[in-house]
């Protein structure tokens, strides 16, 4: 086999791999790096995660989903938080307990109860209220200038952490 034919095959394979990679990252998956401890103990600072863009193609985000979205105050940044308030609901934090429409929310994933009361927040019909699991160290919907995340700014539901490598793969 001559070198020109082999080079052409390598270049073709490389071009196909790049095109497939671009299509996957634009339409199927989204990757994000978690820079802070706002989602501890669920996700650690420095974790690299993959989200599934197609998850909300035929269904809406659900309370408790951990999602990747464009930060409402600066859409050039990607944030990772948990969906707490759904469209039309009222969210309020009183004495460390999160209430949805006056009913206490059971949250076994939070690192610690919030120290500050906040709300009430009434979520618009096309939006979601997000909070980190590490409530006292999370810049989330309670503190943003643009309090709610529009549905079309949610990029995907977190599927898994790929770095650091999970212990069961190492």
Image (cartoon, helix red, strand yellow):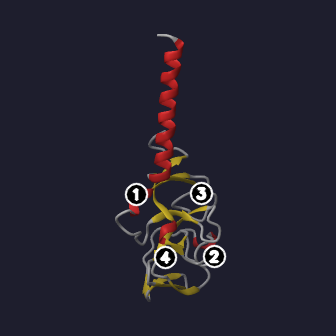
Q: Secondary structure at mark 1?
A: helix
Tell me, for residue 34, which label it has, or none.
3
Looking at the rendered image, the disc whose residue lies closer to the viewer, 2 or 1, is 1
Q: Residue at x 52, y 38 (%)?
A: 18
- Using the rendered view, name the quadrant where residue 73 is placed: bottom right
Q: Are marks 3 and 2 in contact (CB under 8 Å)?
A: no
Q: Residue at x 45, y 53 (%)?
A: 27
Crowd band around label 1 with a 10 angstrom C-alpha radius: few (<14), some (14–19), many (20+): some
Nearer to us in this view, 37 or 61: 61
User: How many circles with numbers are drawn on the protein?
Assistant: 4
Residue placed furthest toward the top: 1
Crowd band around label 4 with a 10 angstrom C-alpha radius: few (<14), some (14–19), many (20+): some
Crowd band around label 2 with a 10 angstrom C-alpha radius: few (<14), some (14–19), many (20+): few
Residue 6 percent across, percent down from the top left: 50, 17
Q: Secondary structure at mark 4?
A: strand
Q: Secondary structure at mark 3?
A: loop
Q: Are marks 4 and 2 in contact (CB under 8 Å)?
A: no
Nearer to us in this view, 119 or 135: 119
| Earlier residue among tags 3 and 1 | 3
Disc 4 to disc 3, C-alpha distance: 23 Å
Looking at the rendered image, the disc whose residue lies closer to the viewer, 4 or 3, is 4
Tell me, for residue 54, which label it has, or none.
1
| Earlier residue among tags 4 and 3 | 3
Residue 146 percent across, percent down from the top left: 61, 77
| Earlier residue among tags 4 and 2 | 4
Disc 3 to disc 1, C-alpha distance: 21 Å
Can residue 97 be seen here? The reply is yes
Q: Secondary structure at mark 2?
A: loop
| Earlier residue among tags 3 and 2 | 3
Q: Which residue is mark 4?
A: 127
Q: Which residue is mark 2?
A: 144
């Amino acid at each position: 086999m001559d070198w020109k034919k082999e080079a052409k095959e390598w270049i073709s394979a490389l071009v196909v791999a790049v095109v497939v990679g671009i299509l996957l990252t634009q339409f199927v998956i989204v990757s994000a790096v978690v820079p802070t401890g706002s989602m501890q103990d669920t996700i650690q600072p420095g974790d690299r995660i993959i989200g599934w863009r197609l998850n909300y193609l035929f269904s809406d985000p659900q309370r408790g989903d951990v999602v990747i979205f464009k930060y409402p105050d600066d859409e050039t940044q990607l944030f990772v938080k948990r969906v707490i308030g759904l469209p039309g609901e009222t969210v309020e934090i009183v004495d460390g307990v999160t209430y949805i429409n006056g009913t206490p929310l059971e949250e076994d994933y939070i690192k610690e109860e919030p120290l500050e009361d906040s709300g009430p927040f009434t979520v618009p019909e096309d939006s979601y209220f997000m909070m980190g699991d590490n409530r006292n160290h999370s810049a989330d919907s309670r503190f943003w200038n643009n309090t709610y995340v529009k549905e079309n700014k949610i990029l995907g539901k977190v599927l898994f952490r790929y770095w650091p490598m999970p212990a069961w793969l190492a």
